Image (cartoon, rainbow, N blue to C red):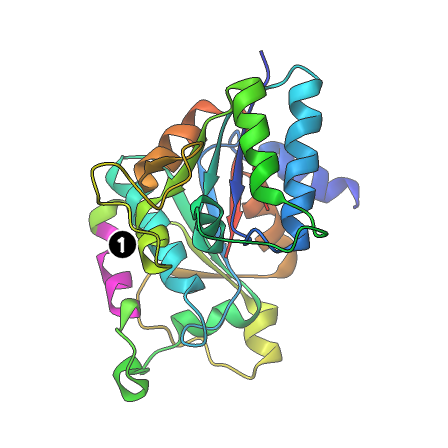
Amino acid sequence: MKTLAVVVTTPPYSHLTISALTYVEAALVAGINVIGVFFYQDGAMHANKDISIASDEYQAIEHWQRLNKEYQLPLHICITAAEKRGIACDSIDNDQVNEAFTVSGLGELVELTTKAARLVQF
Amino acid sequence: MTSSYTQEKNDLPPSNGLAIINSKAPFSSNHGKDALDVALIFGSFEQKVSLFFQGDGVYQLIANQDARLVSIKDYLKTFSAFEFYDIEDIYVCQQSLVNRQLEEKFHIGDVQVLSSIEFGLALNRHQHVLRF
């Protein structure tokens, strides 16, 4: 089984994020086992519930949520990167974190990298 | 690419581990620190990681810099801890140093200065690459 892990370092309003989403969805449709997406640096902003992008623009966060739901695609955010960007991760109910995302640390990136045959960064 | 390069490539050990490319200057953004955090985590999980410095990233290795002068936490000091994390393969692109008129004087030891071709070949030995 081909395994793929993806690292996203671009914010939800970046056009490069669209490339990441298109790539990941194409991989999933092709039957590749995408073992997880790790959101680092500005990528962590995807998990912020309070981000609002104009409705006529590309809704990156909604698309990640959709892939998470349809394919059970694991979405991990780096806690340090998230907290630095104002996303409160320490509350018990993770109020500000979008429920499609799992609050993780860089250890998760090590895990994904060692398990995946390929690692692709956006 | 000529056959001699291909031959050289074939003689190298099989690809393994993670290569981290540092391509940004140290104090204008968080990229250097973010890359360092990834390197140290891989080191502490006993995963093989090599560091590559290229473009403005070479400034991260230059000796006698003091981040405190610009009120930044001096993450470059942590580079001296690499040996404790078994991070031994540190490569810098010679052409990037030449282009910036920088001498090969670094604030850590065991930095290998590589030509563009050697740099590319060293990178090619790794299974995974992250760029910051």
Q: Which residue does the image show at 46% across and 26% down from the upper left?
A: A74
**Which quadrant: the N terminus of chain A?**
top right
A34 left or right of B43 in image: right
| Front-most of residues A87 and A4 | A87
**Residue that extends furthest to the right in the rendered view of this protein:** B2
| Front-most of residues B123 and A81 | A81
Please identify the dominant SS of the magenta region. Answer: helix
| Front-most of residues B38 and A32 | A32
Q: What is the total number of numbered labels drawn onto the structure image?
A: 1
Q: Give residue B60's position: percent from left, percent from top.
A: 41, 70
Amino acid type, label 1: Phe
Q: Give residue A120's position: percent from left, percent from top.
A: 58, 38
Question: Residue beneath label 1, please?
Answer: B82
Q: Residues within 10 Å of mark 1 (few under 14, many from 20)?
A: some
Based on the picture, tell me whether residue B81 belongs to the magenta stretch. Answer: yes
| Front-most of residues B19 and A96 | A96
B14 left or right of A44 in image: right
SS class, disc 1:
helix
Q: Which residues make up the magenta segment?
A: B76-83
**Residue that extends furthest to the top in the rendered view of this protein:** A1
Is residue A1 shown to the viewer in this render? yes
- In the displayed structure, B128 sits above or below B123; it is above
Q: Which residue does the image show at 64% across and 45% down from the upper left?
A: A59
Based on the picture, tell me whether residue A92 belongs to the magenta stretch. Answer: no
Report the chain holding disc 1: B
